[in-house]
Amino acid sequence: MPNTSALFTLNRRKFLVGMSGALGLAMLPPWAKAVAASQDRLKTLKTGAATFSLEPDGPEAVSGAWGYNEQIPGPLLRYRQGDRLKVVLRNGLDQDTTIHWHGIRLPNAMDGVPYVTQPPVEPGDEFEYAFDLPDAGTYWYHPHLNATEQLGRGLSGPLVIDEPEPYPADRDLLWFLDDWLLDQDARIVESFNEIRDITHEGRIGNTITVNGRLPHAIKVRPGERLRVRLINGANGRIFSLTFGDLPVHVIALDGQPVEPHEPDQGRVLLGPAMRADLIIDCTGDDGRTVAVEDSFQAGREFELMTLEFSGPAVDRDDRQTPPPALPANPVPEPVLDDAEQHEVVFGGGMRGDLDRQKMMEMRRHGLAWTVNGEPVHDNGKHEHDPLFILERDRSYRIVFRNETEFHHPIHLHGHHFRVIARNGEKLAIKPLRDTMLMDPRETVEIAFVADNPGDWMLHCHILEHQVGGMNGMFRVRG
Ligand code: C2O
Ligand code: CU
Protein backbone atom coordinates (compact mmCIF):
# COMPACT_ATOMS: atom_id res chain seq x y z
CA MET A 1 0.00 0.00 0.00
CA PRO A 2 1.72 3.21 -1.09
CA ASN A 3 2.06 6.01 1.38
CA THR A 4 -0.64 8.48 0.52
CA SER A 5 -0.78 10.53 3.67
CA ALA A 6 1.74 13.10 2.55
CA LEU A 7 -0.07 13.87 -0.64
CA PHE A 8 -2.89 15.65 1.02
CA THR A 9 -0.35 18.12 2.29
CA LEU A 10 1.32 18.32 -1.07
CA ASN A 11 -1.88 19.12 -2.86
CA ARG A 12 -2.99 21.36 -0.11
CA ARG A 13 0.20 23.36 -0.54
CA LYS A 14 -0.13 23.45 -4.29
CA PHE A 15 -3.69 24.48 -3.81
CA LEU A 16 -2.72 27.31 -1.49
CA VAL A 17 -0.06 28.47 -3.88
CA GLY A 18 -2.66 28.45 -6.59
CA MET A 19 -5.00 30.47 -4.47
CA SER A 20 -2.57 33.20 -3.57
CA GLY A 21 -1.59 33.59 -7.16
CA ALA A 22 -5.32 33.43 -7.60
CA LEU A 23 -6.01 35.09 -10.86
CA GLY A 24 -4.00 32.63 -12.83
CA LEU A 25 -6.70 30.18 -11.84
CA ALA A 26 -9.64 32.48 -12.12
CA MET A 27 -10.25 31.75 -15.75
CA LEU A 28 -13.60 30.02 -16.02
CA PRO A 29 -13.63 26.36 -16.94
CA PRO A 30 -15.16 25.88 -20.37
CA TRP A 31 -18.50 24.62 -19.06
CA ALA A 32 -18.86 27.38 -16.58
CA LYS A 33 -19.77 29.85 -19.25
CA ALA A 34 -23.49 30.08 -19.66
CA VAL A 35 -24.01 27.34 -22.13
CA ALA A 36 -26.64 27.54 -24.78
CA ALA A 37 -25.09 24.53 -26.33
CA SER A 38 -26.40 22.98 -29.43
CA GLN A 39 -25.85 19.25 -29.53
CA ASP A 40 -24.75 17.11 -32.36
CA ARG A 41 -27.34 14.44 -32.61
CA LEU A 42 -25.06 11.41 -32.68
CA LYS A 43 -22.16 11.23 -30.29
CA THR A 44 -19.45 8.73 -29.75
CA LEU A 45 -18.05 8.06 -26.32
CA LYS A 46 -14.88 6.06 -26.43
CA THR A 47 -13.43 4.62 -23.26
CA GLY A 48 -9.67 4.51 -22.89
CA ALA A 49 -6.65 5.87 -21.12
CA ALA A 50 -6.68 9.58 -20.33
CA THR A 51 -4.21 11.98 -18.83
CA PHE A 52 -5.19 15.18 -17.16
CA SER A 53 -3.60 17.89 -15.07
CA LEU A 54 -4.96 18.91 -11.74
CA GLU A 55 -4.34 22.54 -12.65
CA PRO A 56 -4.75 24.22 -16.01
CA ASP A 57 -1.42 24.01 -17.82
CA GLY A 58 -0.06 22.30 -14.71
CA PRO A 59 3.03 20.27 -15.39
CA GLU A 60 1.88 17.36 -13.30
CA ALA A 61 -0.41 14.94 -14.99
CA VAL A 62 -2.42 12.33 -13.17
CA SER A 63 -1.52 8.93 -14.52
CA GLY A 64 -3.55 5.77 -14.60
CA ALA A 65 -6.78 7.59 -15.41
CA TRP A 66 -9.42 6.33 -17.82
CA GLY A 67 -11.83 8.64 -19.54
CA TYR A 68 -14.48 9.02 -22.22
CA ASN A 69 -12.88 10.60 -25.29
CA GLU A 70 -9.78 11.13 -23.16
CA GLN A 71 -11.61 13.72 -21.06
CA ILE A 72 -11.83 13.96 -17.28
CA PRO A 73 -14.66 14.16 -16.46
CA GLY A 74 -16.32 12.85 -19.61
CA PRO A 75 -17.77 15.29 -22.16
CA LEU A 76 -20.78 17.30 -21.09
CA LEU A 77 -23.78 15.87 -22.94
CA ARG A 78 -26.43 18.54 -23.17
CA TYR A 79 -29.91 18.19 -24.64
CA ARG A 80 -33.33 19.76 -24.49
CA GLN A 81 -36.18 18.10 -22.70
CA GLY A 82 -37.92 15.75 -25.13
CA ASP A 83 -34.81 15.27 -27.31
CA ARG A 84 -33.57 11.86 -28.21
CA LEU A 85 -30.12 10.88 -26.97
CA LYS A 86 -28.05 8.79 -29.36
CA VAL A 87 -24.63 7.72 -28.20
CA VAL A 88 -22.34 5.04 -29.50
CA LEU A 89 -20.13 3.59 -26.79
CA ARG A 90 -16.83 2.33 -28.17
CA ASN A 91 -14.85 0.27 -25.75
CA GLY A 92 -11.14 1.04 -25.92
CA LEU A 93 -10.42 -0.56 -22.54
CA ASP A 94 -9.01 -4.03 -22.17
CA GLN A 95 -11.98 -5.01 -20.04
CA ASP A 96 -15.76 -5.06 -20.46
CA THR A 97 -17.81 -1.95 -19.83
CA THR A 98 -21.30 -0.41 -20.27
CA ILE A 99 -22.87 3.00 -19.75
CA HIS A 100 -25.60 3.57 -17.19
CA TRP A 101 -27.51 6.86 -17.60
CA HIS A 102 -27.99 7.67 -13.96
CA GLY A 103 -31.41 9.09 -13.16
CA ILE A 104 -32.84 8.96 -16.66
CA ARG A 105 -36.25 7.30 -16.94
CA LEU A 106 -35.55 5.22 -20.01
CA PRO A 107 -36.52 1.86 -21.52
CA ASN A 108 -34.98 -1.03 -19.60
CA ALA A 109 -32.84 -2.21 -22.53
CA MET A 110 -30.96 1.13 -22.47
CA ASP A 111 -30.15 1.09 -18.75
CA GLY A 112 -26.63 -0.25 -19.13
CA VAL A 113 -26.62 -3.01 -16.54
CA PRO A 114 -24.55 -5.94 -17.81
CA TYR A 115 -26.21 -9.37 -17.84
CA VAL A 116 -29.48 -7.76 -16.73
CA THR A 117 -30.37 -5.27 -19.48
CA GLN A 118 -27.62 -5.90 -22.05
CA PRO A 119 -24.54 -8.02 -22.64
CA PRO A 120 -21.31 -6.35 -21.51
CA VAL A 121 -19.52 -4.38 -24.23
CA GLU A 122 -16.28 -6.24 -24.81
CA PRO A 123 -12.92 -4.65 -25.64
CA GLY A 124 -13.03 -3.30 -29.19
CA ASP A 125 -16.81 -3.61 -29.41
CA GLU A 126 -19.46 -0.96 -29.51
CA PHE A 127 -23.03 -0.48 -28.38
CA GLU A 128 -25.54 2.14 -29.43
CA TYR A 129 -27.70 3.78 -26.81
CA ALA A 130 -30.76 5.63 -28.08
CA PHE A 131 -33.69 6.86 -26.01
CA ASP A 132 -35.90 9.87 -25.41
CA LEU A 133 -35.25 12.26 -22.54
CA PRO A 134 -38.55 12.86 -20.73
CA ASP A 135 -37.24 14.97 -17.86
CA ALA A 136 -35.23 18.17 -17.68
CA GLY A 137 -32.50 18.34 -15.06
CA THR A 138 -28.99 17.44 -13.98
CA TYR A 139 -27.93 13.83 -14.54
CA TRP A 140 -24.76 11.88 -15.21
CA TYR A 141 -23.43 8.76 -16.87
CA HIS A 142 -20.96 6.09 -15.83
CA PRO A 143 -20.08 2.41 -16.35
CA HIS A 144 -22.02 -0.27 -14.49
CA LEU A 145 -19.34 -2.89 -14.48
CA ASN A 146 -16.23 -3.10 -12.32
CA ALA A 147 -17.49 0.28 -11.20
CA THR A 148 -15.11 0.70 -8.26
CA GLU A 149 -12.18 0.74 -10.67
CA GLN A 150 -13.83 2.22 -13.76
CA LEU A 151 -15.30 5.19 -11.90
CA GLY A 152 -12.32 5.33 -9.55
CA ARG A 153 -10.11 5.91 -12.59
CA GLY A 154 -12.35 8.64 -13.95
CA LEU A 155 -15.01 7.14 -16.22
CA SER A 156 -18.04 9.33 -15.64
CA GLY A 157 -19.47 12.51 -17.05
CA PRO A 158 -22.31 15.03 -16.79
CA LEU A 159 -25.61 14.93 -18.66
CA VAL A 160 -27.72 18.08 -18.59
CA ILE A 161 -31.22 18.34 -20.01
CA ASP A 162 -32.50 21.86 -20.38
CA GLU A 163 -36.01 23.02 -19.58
CA PRO A 164 -37.98 24.36 -22.56
CA GLU A 165 -37.69 27.92 -21.19
CA PRO A 166 -34.37 29.13 -19.81
CA TYR A 167 -34.38 29.56 -16.03
CA PRO A 168 -33.93 33.18 -14.89
CA ALA A 169 -30.37 33.03 -13.55
CA ASP A 170 -27.42 35.09 -14.74
CA ARG A 171 -25.22 32.05 -15.22
CA ASP A 172 -25.59 28.30 -15.29
CA LEU A 173 -22.56 26.58 -13.76
CA LEU A 174 -21.78 22.92 -13.44
CA TRP A 175 -19.48 21.56 -10.74
CA PHE A 176 -18.70 17.90 -11.26
CA LEU A 177 -17.13 16.79 -7.99
CA ASP A 178 -14.77 13.86 -7.76
CA ASP A 179 -12.39 12.37 -5.26
CA TRP A 180 -9.15 10.62 -6.26
CA LEU A 181 -6.76 8.40 -4.38
CA LEU A 182 -3.33 9.35 -5.70
CA ASP A 183 0.19 8.51 -4.64
CA GLN A 184 3.09 10.97 -4.35
CA ASP A 185 3.66 10.95 -8.08
CA ALA A 186 0.02 11.64 -8.89
CA ARG A 187 -0.58 8.05 -9.96
CA ILE A 188 -3.96 6.57 -9.24
CA VAL A 189 -3.55 4.08 -6.42
CA GLU A 190 -4.57 0.75 -7.88
CA SER A 191 -5.81 -0.94 -4.75
CA PHE A 192 -9.46 -1.09 -5.75
CA ASN A 193 -11.84 -3.21 -3.70
CA GLU A 194 -9.74 -3.04 -0.53
CA ILE A 195 -11.60 -4.96 2.14
CA ARG A 196 -11.12 -2.04 4.52
CA ASP A 197 -12.92 0.30 2.12
CA ILE A 198 -15.60 -2.29 1.50
CA THR A 199 -16.33 -2.76 5.20
CA HIS A 200 -16.14 0.96 6.10
CA GLU A 201 -17.08 4.11 4.18
CA GLY A 202 -15.85 3.16 0.72
CA ARG A 203 -12.77 4.38 -1.09
CA ILE A 204 -12.07 7.87 0.20
CA GLY A 205 -9.42 9.69 -1.78
CA ASN A 206 -6.91 12.41 -0.97
CA THR A 207 -7.47 14.77 -3.89
CA ILE A 208 -10.74 16.53 -4.64
CA THR A 209 -11.46 17.88 -8.10
CA VAL A 210 -14.13 20.15 -9.48
CA ASN A 211 -14.55 19.63 -13.22
CA GLY A 212 -11.27 17.68 -13.19
CA ARG A 213 -9.26 20.45 -11.49
CA LEU A 214 -8.16 21.11 -7.95
CA PRO A 215 -10.42 23.44 -6.01
CA HIS A 216 -10.02 26.89 -7.47
CA ALA A 217 -11.42 30.40 -7.57
CA ILE A 218 -13.98 31.71 -9.99
CA LYS A 219 -15.07 35.26 -10.54
CA VAL A 220 -18.61 36.34 -9.90
CA ARG A 221 -20.26 39.72 -10.33
CA PRO A 222 -21.64 41.40 -7.22
CA GLY A 223 -25.38 40.69 -7.15
CA GLU A 224 -25.11 37.92 -9.70
CA ARG A 225 -27.62 35.06 -9.42
CA LEU A 226 -25.94 31.72 -10.15
CA ARG A 227 -27.53 28.41 -10.90
CA VAL A 228 -24.99 25.82 -9.78
CA ARG A 229 -25.48 22.20 -10.75
CA LEU A 230 -23.61 19.92 -8.35
CA ILE A 231 -22.89 16.32 -9.23
CA ASN A 232 -21.10 14.00 -6.83
CA GLY A 233 -19.13 11.58 -9.00
CA ALA A 234 -17.01 10.16 -6.15
CA ASN A 235 -16.85 6.45 -5.28
CA GLY A 236 -17.43 6.96 -1.58
CA ARG A 237 -17.05 10.55 -0.44
CA ILE A 238 -20.04 12.43 0.94
CA PHE A 239 -19.96 16.24 0.76
CA SER A 240 -21.66 18.66 3.14
CA LEU A 241 -21.34 22.11 1.61
CA THR A 242 -21.77 25.60 3.00
CA PHE A 243 -21.65 28.88 1.11
CA GLY A 244 -20.63 31.48 3.67
CA ASP A 245 -23.49 33.88 4.30
CA LEU A 246 -24.78 33.88 0.73
CA PRO A 247 -28.49 33.20 0.23
CA VAL A 248 -28.78 29.69 -1.21
CA HIS A 249 -31.91 27.92 -2.43
CA VAL A 250 -32.25 24.34 -3.60
CA ILE A 251 -34.39 24.19 -6.76
CA ALA A 252 -33.80 20.60 -7.88
CA LEU A 253 -32.55 17.35 -6.38
CA ASP A 254 -31.33 14.47 -8.53
CA GLY A 255 -32.58 16.39 -11.56
CA GLN A 256 -36.16 16.74 -10.31
CA PRO A 257 -37.55 20.16 -9.40
CA VAL A 258 -38.31 20.72 -5.75
CA GLU A 259 -40.13 23.59 -4.09
CA PRO A 260 -37.34 26.20 -3.75
CA HIS A 261 -36.09 26.09 -0.18
CA GLU A 262 -33.05 26.94 1.86
CA PRO A 263 -30.87 23.93 2.55
CA ASP A 264 -31.50 22.24 5.87
CA GLN A 265 -29.24 23.93 8.45
CA GLY A 266 -27.55 25.79 5.61
CA ARG A 267 -25.84 22.62 4.38
CA VAL A 268 -26.15 20.89 1.06
CA LEU A 269 -25.58 17.21 1.69
CA LEU A 270 -24.49 15.24 -1.33
CA GLY A 271 -23.77 11.52 -1.19
CA PRO A 272 -22.17 9.70 -4.12
CA ALA A 273 -24.30 9.95 -7.30
CA MET A 274 -26.54 12.65 -5.86
CA ARG A 275 -27.14 15.99 -7.56
CA ALA A 276 -28.44 19.35 -6.43
CA ASP A 277 -29.30 22.45 -8.46
CA LEU A 278 -28.76 25.53 -6.34
CA ILE A 279 -29.55 29.19 -6.76
CA ILE A 280 -26.81 31.25 -5.14
CA ASP A 281 -27.21 35.00 -4.84
CA CYS A 282 -23.83 36.70 -4.76
CA THR A 283 -24.70 39.41 -2.28
CA GLY A 284 -21.85 41.77 -1.45
CA ASP A 285 -19.45 44.16 -3.06
CA ASP A 286 -16.61 44.11 -5.47
CA GLY A 287 -13.50 42.62 -3.86
CA ARG A 288 -15.33 40.25 -1.55
CA THR A 289 -14.41 36.56 -1.48
CA VAL A 290 -16.63 33.76 -0.24
CA ALA A 291 -15.47 30.21 0.37
CA VAL A 292 -17.59 27.19 -0.46
CA GLU A 293 -16.56 24.67 2.16
CA ASP A 294 -17.01 21.00 2.83
CA SER A 295 -17.35 19.97 6.45
CA PHE A 296 -18.75 16.46 6.24
CA GLN A 297 -15.86 15.09 8.27
CA ALA A 298 -15.30 17.12 11.40
CA GLY A 299 -11.67 18.18 11.62
CA ARG A 300 -11.10 17.62 7.91
CA GLU A 301 -12.89 20.64 6.52
CA PHE A 302 -11.58 22.06 3.28
CA GLU A 303 -12.32 24.78 0.81
CA LEU A 304 -14.03 23.43 -2.28
CA MET A 305 -14.32 26.60 -4.33
CA THR A 306 -13.82 30.31 -3.87
CA LEU A 307 -16.11 32.97 -5.27
CA GLU A 308 -14.28 36.22 -6.02
CA PHE A 309 -16.54 39.20 -6.44
CA SER A 310 -15.40 41.55 -9.15
CA GLY A 311 -16.75 43.91 -11.74
CA PRO A 312 -19.84 46.08 -11.91
CA ALA A 313 -22.87 45.00 -9.88
CA VAL A 314 -25.71 43.13 -11.52
CA ASP A 315 -29.00 44.96 -11.16
CA ARG A 316 -31.34 42.59 -9.33
CA ASP A 317 -34.49 44.67 -9.03
CA ASP A 318 -36.77 42.16 -10.69
CA ARG A 319 -35.50 39.23 -8.66
CA GLN A 320 -37.89 37.02 -6.78
CA THR A 321 -36.84 35.58 -3.45
CA PRO A 322 -37.23 32.69 -2.99
CA PRO A 323 -36.32 32.09 -6.62
CA PRO A 324 -39.01 30.71 -8.91
CA ALA A 325 -39.66 26.97 -9.06
CA LEU A 326 -38.65 24.93 -12.07
CA PRO A 327 -41.51 23.47 -14.10
CA ALA A 328 -42.37 19.95 -12.95
CA ASN A 329 -41.29 16.96 -15.02
CA PRO A 330 -43.92 14.43 -16.14
CA VAL A 331 -43.24 11.96 -13.31
CA PRO A 332 -46.38 10.11 -12.15
CA GLU A 333 -47.47 10.88 -8.60
CA PRO A 334 -47.90 7.87 -6.26
CA VAL A 335 -51.26 7.40 -4.56
CA LEU A 336 -50.46 6.39 -1.03
CA ASP A 337 -53.77 5.23 0.39
CA ASP A 338 -53.86 1.70 -0.92
CA ALA A 339 -50.20 1.41 -1.89
CA GLU A 340 -48.71 -1.99 -1.22
CA GLN A 341 -45.67 -1.87 1.04
CA HIS A 342 -42.32 -3.63 0.84
CA GLU A 343 -39.39 -3.51 3.18
CA VAL A 344 -35.69 -3.64 2.39
CA VAL A 345 -33.28 -4.15 5.26
CA PHE A 346 -29.62 -3.24 4.83
CA GLY A 347 -27.17 -4.94 7.17
CA GLY A 348 -23.50 -5.66 7.71
CA GLY A 349 -20.36 -3.56 7.65
CA MET A 350 -18.04 -2.83 10.56
CA ARG A 351 -19.78 -2.71 13.92
CA GLY A 352 -22.99 -3.94 12.30
CA ASP A 353 -25.40 -6.47 13.74
CA LEU A 354 -24.43 -9.42 11.57
CA ASP A 355 -23.22 -12.41 13.44
CA ARG A 356 -19.47 -12.78 13.48
CA GLN A 357 -19.44 -16.14 11.80
CA LYS A 358 -21.45 -14.90 8.86
CA MET A 359 -19.38 -11.74 8.57
CA MET A 360 -16.14 -13.76 8.46
CA GLU A 361 -17.56 -16.07 5.84
CA MET A 362 -18.69 -13.14 3.69
CA ARG A 363 -15.33 -11.40 4.01
CA ARG A 364 -13.63 -14.40 2.53
CA HIS A 365 -15.55 -13.59 -0.64
CA GLY A 366 -14.90 -9.86 -0.48
CA LEU A 367 -18.41 -9.21 0.80
CA ALA A 368 -19.51 -7.23 3.83
CA TRP A 369 -23.09 -6.07 3.33
CA THR A 370 -26.49 -7.70 3.13
CA VAL A 371 -29.81 -6.81 1.55
CA ASN A 372 -32.69 -8.57 3.30
CA GLY A 373 -30.22 -10.81 5.05
CA GLU A 374 -27.97 -11.88 2.19
CA PRO A 375 -25.12 -10.29 0.26
CA VAL A 376 -25.84 -9.91 -3.46
CA HIS A 377 -23.00 -9.93 -5.97
CA ASP A 378 -23.02 -6.99 -8.31
CA ASN A 379 -21.74 -8.79 -11.36
CA GLY A 380 -25.14 -10.12 -12.31
CA LYS A 381 -23.75 -13.27 -13.86
CA HIS A 382 -25.42 -14.94 -10.95
CA GLU A 383 -29.13 -14.68 -11.61
CA HIS A 384 -30.64 -12.07 -9.36
CA ASP A 385 -33.84 -13.05 -7.67
CA PRO A 386 -35.97 -9.95 -7.54
CA LEU A 387 -36.37 -8.44 -4.08
CA PHE A 388 -39.97 -7.76 -5.05
CA ILE A 389 -42.16 -7.90 -8.13
CA LEU A 390 -44.36 -4.91 -8.86
CA GLU A 391 -47.36 -4.47 -11.09
CA ARG A 392 -47.07 -1.85 -13.76
CA ASP A 393 -48.61 1.57 -13.03
CA ARG A 394 -49.41 0.73 -9.40
CA SER A 395 -48.16 2.83 -6.49
CA TYR A 396 -45.82 1.30 -3.92
CA ARG A 397 -44.29 2.28 -0.62
CA ILE A 398 -40.87 0.93 0.18
CA VAL A 399 -39.38 1.11 3.64
CA PHE A 400 -35.58 1.10 3.73
CA ARG A 401 -34.22 0.07 7.10
CA ASN A 402 -30.56 0.82 7.67
CA GLU A 403 -29.30 -1.59 10.31
CA THR A 404 -25.69 -0.48 9.90
CA GLU A 405 -23.39 2.13 11.38
CA PHE A 406 -22.79 3.81 8.01
CA HIS A 407 -24.43 6.20 5.57
CA HIS A 408 -25.74 4.68 2.35
CA PRO A 409 -26.91 6.53 -0.78
CA ILE A 410 -29.52 4.10 -2.08
CA HIS A 411 -30.25 4.36 -5.79
CA LEU A 412 -33.21 2.96 -7.74
CA HIS A 413 -32.90 2.53 -11.47
CA GLY A 414 -35.60 3.51 -13.96
CA HIS A 415 -37.77 5.50 -11.55
CA HIS A 416 -37.82 8.56 -9.36
CA PHE A 417 -39.44 8.20 -5.96
CA ARG A 418 -40.86 10.56 -3.36
CA VAL A 419 -39.10 10.51 -0.01
CA ILE A 420 -42.06 10.66 2.35
CA ALA A 421 -40.77 9.95 5.85
CA ARG A 422 -37.54 9.58 7.78
CA ASN A 423 -37.49 7.66 11.05
CA GLY A 424 -41.27 7.64 10.98
CA GLU A 425 -41.54 11.40 10.67
CA LYS A 426 -43.37 12.72 7.63
CA LEU A 427 -41.33 15.23 5.65
CA ALA A 428 -42.67 18.73 5.01
CA ILE A 429 -41.00 18.80 1.61
CA LYS A 430 -41.12 15.39 -0.06
CA PRO A 431 -38.47 15.51 -2.77
CA LEU A 432 -38.50 13.35 -5.86
CA ARG A 433 -35.16 11.58 -6.04
CA ASP A 434 -33.33 8.71 -7.64
CA THR A 435 -30.80 8.36 -4.81
CA MET A 436 -31.55 8.74 -1.11
CA LEU A 437 -28.84 9.20 1.51
CA MET A 438 -29.73 7.14 4.58
CA ASP A 439 -28.13 8.06 7.88
CA PRO A 440 -26.69 5.29 10.04
CA ARG A 441 -29.53 3.29 11.67
CA GLU A 442 -32.14 5.35 9.88
CA THR A 443 -35.45 4.20 8.43
CA VAL A 444 -36.59 5.93 5.26
CA GLU A 445 -39.93 5.56 3.55
CA ILE A 446 -40.31 6.22 -0.14
CA ALA A 447 -43.18 5.89 -2.62
CA PHE A 448 -43.36 5.69 -6.38
CA VAL A 449 -45.40 4.51 -9.33
CA ALA A 450 -43.91 1.41 -10.94
CA ASP A 451 -44.55 2.66 -14.47
CA ASN A 452 -41.45 1.35 -16.18
CA PRO A 453 -41.41 -2.39 -16.95
CA GLY A 454 -38.25 -4.42 -16.60
CA ASP A 455 -35.63 -5.60 -14.14
CA TRP A 456 -34.12 -2.64 -12.31
CA MET A 457 -31.24 -2.39 -9.88
CA LEU A 458 -31.55 -1.03 -6.39
CA HIS A 459 -28.20 -0.54 -4.71
CA CYS A 460 -25.93 1.52 -2.56
CA HIS A 461 -23.97 4.03 -4.65
CA ILE A 462 -20.93 3.87 -2.42
CA LEU A 463 -19.36 1.63 -5.01
CA GLU A 464 -17.32 -0.38 -2.53
CA HIS A 465 -20.55 -1.18 -0.68
CA GLN A 466 -22.22 -2.20 -3.90
CA VAL A 467 -19.37 -4.53 -4.83
CA GLY A 468 -19.43 -5.75 -1.22
CA GLY A 469 -22.98 -7.06 -1.50
CA MET A 470 -25.29 -4.05 -1.12
CA ASN A 471 -27.06 -4.67 -4.30
CA GLY A 472 -30.41 -5.91 -5.45
CA MET A 473 -32.93 -6.02 -8.25
CA PHE A 474 -36.67 -5.42 -8.46
CA ARG A 475 -39.00 -6.31 -11.28
CA VAL A 476 -41.81 -4.31 -12.79
CA ARG A 477 -44.08 -6.65 -14.71
CA GLY A 478 -44.80 -5.38 -18.21
CU1 C2O B 1 -25.32 5.50 -10.84
CU2 C2O B 1 -26.70 1.64 -10.59
O1 C2O B 1 -25.95 3.55 -10.72
CU1 CU C 1 -23.59 1.86 1.28
Image (cartoon, rainbow, N blue to C red):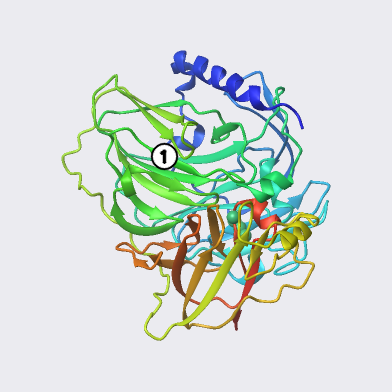
Q: Is residue 355 above or below residue 37?
A: below
Where is mark 1, residue-wise?
241
Q: The N terminus appears in which quarter of the rendering?
A: top right
Q: Is residue 110 above or below residue 192?
A: below
User: What is the total number of numbered labels drawn onto the structure image?
Assistant: 1
Q: Which of the two residues, 27 or 205, is positioned nearer the viewer here? A: 205
Residue 44 visible, this angle? no
Task: Determine the residue located farthest toward the front in the rendered image.
Answer: 356
Q: Position of residue 251 (x, y in %)?
A: 34, 52
The residue at 80%/57% (across/down) is: 365
- Ligand 2's image quarter is bottom right
Name which residue type carries label 1: Leu
Q: Position of residue 476 (x, y in %)?
A: 59, 79
The residue at 69%/38% (across/down) is: 70
- Answer with left or right where residue 111 lies relative to residue 405: right
Residue 345 visible, this angle? yes
Q: The C terminus appears in which quarter of the rendering?
A: bottom right
